[in-house]
C-alpha cells in the first residue's frame, strides 16, 4: 500500500474531472476569448463578492502578482515569518515585487493586530515604506491553523488606519470555510486581493485565481503576461477548476477530520514531542530531541507512507482527495505501532 501524505498537491484528476476537461469549450485566453476561463473567473469573483478574478497557472504566480501590484521600490510587505511568500517562493518578493519583506514572529503562522501595529514603519526616508500586509489562511507551515473573521477584522482596522493594502494567500481557504461555515464573500470583502488555489485540496491539476476589483485585476493581467502566465486554450484547465468547485468543496471536511485523527495518533507516539493543534488538513509534529525527522520520513517511506521533513526536526503530513478509508486505517495502525 502507498499512502502519499506528502502534500495535497499530489492528487490526480478524477475520471469525471478529466471528462469535464475533455468537454471544455475553449478559445484564446490572451485575447480574453476562452469561454471556460471567463466563466471560471466570473464565478470565482462573484463567489467572493469581488468584481474580477484572474486565472493563473499557480498559487506562487497569483501571490507574486499581488506583490507586484501592491508594492514596489523602497517599499515592504509585512507578513508572518512562516508565510509561503517568504519561505517558499524563491525570494520572489525581492525579484518580482522589488520590495523588502518585514517578518513578524507570529504563532502557528498567524500575526496579531498589535504585532502588526508595532511592525509598521514610521515614514522616515531612511526606512522602507510599509505598504502591504499579507496573511495566509490556512497557514501551511503553521500546521493548517486559521484566522477567524474577528481576528482579521482587527488586523484590517490597523491596515485601514495606516493606509496599507491587504492581501490574502488563501491557497487552502476552502479547507477553512468548511470548518467555519463562513460565506466566501465574508472573506472577499475584507481583502484588496485574494489568491485561491484549485490544485491543492480541490484536486485540480493546475490553477489559482487572483481576486480583486476590476482595476487591480486589469493591472494583474499585465503582470501575468510579463511572467509568461498568459495561456491560450486554458479552458481545458479551467474546466477542471469549475468541476472542482462543483464537486470537491464540501468533501474537504473529510480531509480535515482525517488529519485530526492522524494528529491524535501522533500525539501518543513516543518519538513525538509536540503536535501542532490540527485545525484543517495539515499535521505538523515535532520529534523528541533524540529522534530525527529525516529518519522518521525514511522509516515511514519504507512502510509505504510518504511524509515531508520540514526542518527544525518537524515532519508534515497532509490529507487530500486521493486518500481513502483503507489508506487511513493503514496509516493510523502503522503510526500507532511505529518505533524509531
Ligand atoms: C499557502 C500556500 N500558498 C501558495 C502556494 C503556492 O502554490 P503553487 O504550488 O501552486 O505555486 C502554496 C503551495 O503549496 C501554499 O501552500
Image: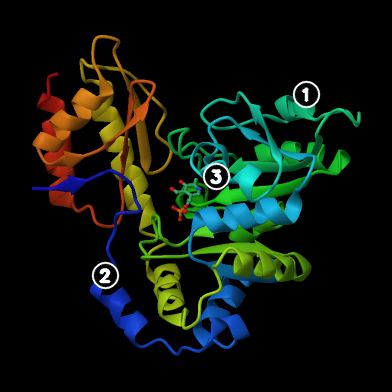
Q: Which residue is mark 3?
A: 137
Where in the figure is residue 161, as x and y percent of width and height? 87, 39
Residue corresponding to mark 1: 118
Reading the image, the residue beneath label 2 is 14
Cα distance between the residues tagged 3 and 1: 22 Å
Total marks in image: 3
Q: Quadrant of residue 33?
A: bottom right
Disc 1 element? helix
User: Callout 1 environment at 10 Å: few (<14), some (14 to 19), or many (20+)?
Assistant: few
At x 61% / y 23%, what residue is drawn?
A: 105
Compared to residue 316, the image places residue 321 above or below, namely: below
**SS state under label 2:** loop
Earlier in the chain: of badge 1 and badge 2, it is: 2
**C-alpha separation, residue under disc 2 versus residue under disc 3:** 26 Å
Q: Residues within 10 Å of mark 3 (few under 14, many from 20)?
A: many
Which residue is at 18% across, 44% downward? Answer: 328
Please tell me whether residue 163 is drawn above or below residue 311 in the rendered image: below
Q: Is residue 12 left or right of residue 211?
A: left
User: Does label 2 or label 3 sit earlier along the sequence?
Assistant: 2
> Which residue: 10% across, 25% down?
337
Which residue is rendered at x = 58% and y = 39% of the image? 147
On the image, the x and y values in percent for residue 118 come to 78, 23
Image coords of residue 110 (percent x, y): 58, 32
Instruction: Say if disc 2 is inside 8 Å of ligand 1.
Output: no
Question: Of circles 3 and 1, which is in front?
Answer: 1
Report whether 264 appears left or right of 300.
right
Query: Of helix, strand and loop, which one carries label 3?
Result: loop
Amino acid at each position: 500500500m502507498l499512502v502519499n501524505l506528502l502534500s495535497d498537491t499530489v492528487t490526480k484528476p478524477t475520471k469525471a474531472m478529466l471528462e469535464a476537461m475533455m468537454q471544455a469549450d475553449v478559445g484564446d485566453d490572451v485575447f480574453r476569448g476562452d469561454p471556460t476561463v471567463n466563466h471560471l473567473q466570473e464565478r470565482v469573483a462573484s463567489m467572493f463578492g469581488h468584481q474580477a478574478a484572474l486565472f493563473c497557472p499557480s498559487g506562487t504566480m497569483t501571490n507574486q502578482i499581488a506583490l507586484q501590484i501592491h508594492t514596489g521600490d523602497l517599499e515592504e510587505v509585512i507578513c508572518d515569518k512562516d508565510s509561503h511568500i517568504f519561505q517558499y517562493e524563491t525570494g520572489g518578493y525581492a525579484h518580482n515585487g522589488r520590495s523588502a519583506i518585514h517578518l513578524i514572529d507570529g504563532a502557528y503562522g498567524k500575526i496579531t493586530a498589535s504585532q502588526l501595529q508595532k511592525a509598521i514603519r514610521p515614514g522616515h526616508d531612511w526606512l522602507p515604506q510599509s505598504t502591504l500586509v499579507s496573511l495566509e489562511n490556512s497557514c501551511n507551515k503553521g500546521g493548517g491553523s486559521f484566522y477567524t473573521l474577528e481576528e482579521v477584522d482587527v488586523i484590517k482596522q490597523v491596515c485601514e488606519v495606516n493606509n496599507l493594502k491587504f492581501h490574502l494567500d488563501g491557497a487552502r481557504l476552502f479547507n477553512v470555510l468548511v470548518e467555519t461555515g463562513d460565506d466566501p464573500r465574508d472573506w472577499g470583502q475584507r481583502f484588496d486581493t485574494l489568491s485561491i488555489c484549485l490544485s491543492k485540496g480541490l484536486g485540480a491539476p493546475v490553477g489559482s485565481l487572483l481576486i480583486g476589483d476590476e482595476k487591480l485585476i486589469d493591472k494583474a493581467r499585465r503582470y501575468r503576461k510579463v511572467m509568461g502566465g498568459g495561456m491560450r486554450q486554458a479552458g481545458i484547465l479551467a474546466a477542471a477548476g469549475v468541476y472542482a468547485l462543483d464537486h470537491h468543496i464540501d468533501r474537504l471536511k473529510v480531509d480535515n477530520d482525517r488529519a485530526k485523527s492522524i494528529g491524535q495518533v501522533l500525539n501518543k507516539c513516543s518519538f513525538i514531542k509536540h503536535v501542532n493543534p490540527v485545525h484543517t488538513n495539515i499535521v505538523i509534529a515535532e520529534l523528541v530531541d533524540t529522534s530525527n525527522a529525516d529518519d522518521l520520513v525514511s522509516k515511514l517511506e519504507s512502510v509505504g507512507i510518504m511524509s515531508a521533513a520540514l526542518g527544525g526536526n518537524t515532519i508534515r503530513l497532509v490529507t487530500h482527495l486521493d486518500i481513502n478509508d483503507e489508506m487511513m486505517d493503514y496509516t493510523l495502525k502503522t503510526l500507532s505501532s511505529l518505533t524509531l
